[in-house]
Image: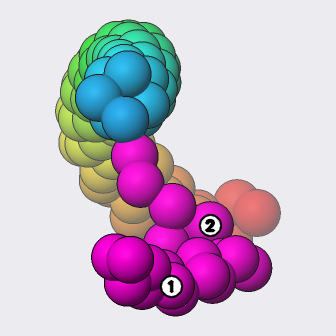
Amino acid sequence: MPSITKSRPRKQTDSTNDLPATRKMLFQVRDELKSDFRGLEYKFEGLEHKFEGMEHKFDAFTAEMRAIAKNMEAIAAQTKASVIRIEAIVEHQRADNKIVYEGLGLANQRLDRVESVLIKNKLM
């Protein structure tokens, strides 16, 4: 009689790591990973669009600030022109006042001379 060898009983595996993977399972995992990567790509594209939007807003803000700065420079130039104009008017007035003051001084000297003559002549 032939001898029958007893085969060893198979061990039941408690861990799924020890189970064999089929080709179909590998393709499913690959498809899942590809899908996850596509999802990440779409998220990054969305972030890129958000950053582009923020960049456009920042550019608009920068342009607005430049316009405000130019407007302030124009106001400063107008103010400086007004100050220079006022300085010229004040200087002209000062010159006129000097002429009037000199004239009043001469008139006062003449009046003093006339008074002194009248006092000498005892007419006053």
**Where on the picture, by quarter, is residue 109?**
bottom left
In depth, the one of 34 and 76 nearer the eye is: 34
Q: Position of residue 4 (x, y in %)?
A: 43, 79
Point out the tag, 1 or 2, that comes first from the N-terminus: 1
Residue nearest the viewer, comparing 16 with 29: 16
Q: Position of residue 39 (x, y in %)?
A: 46, 21
Relative to residue 123, is residue 119 depicted above or below? below
Under mark 1, the amino acid is Lys
Question: Residue drawn 62% across and 67% down?
Answer: 16
Tag 2: amino acid: Thr
- Residue 93 seen: no
Q: Which portion, as a residue range, is magenta?
A: 1-21
Please name the predominant secondary structure of the magenta segment in the image: loop
Image location (x, y in percent) of residue 51: 38, 27
For the residues marked 1 and 2, what is the alpha-carbon distance in whole angstroms?
27 Å
Q: Residues within 10 Å of mark 2 (few under 14, many from 20)?
A: few
Which percent across, then down, holds residue 86? 37, 31
| Residue 91, label in figure | none
Residue drawn where x is 29% and y is 29% of the image = 23
In terms of secondary structure, where does tag 1 sit?
A: loop
Q: Quadrant of the N terminus?
A: bottom left
Q: Is residue 17 magenta?
A: yes
Say whether residue 108 is left or right of residue 95. right
Which quarter of the figure is the C terminus placed in? bottom right
Is 62 within the magenta? Answer: no
Q: Which residue is mark 1?
A: 6
- Side of 96 relative to 109 (left or right): left
**Residue nearest the viewer, comparing 59 with 22:** 22
Give the residue at mark 2. Answer: 16
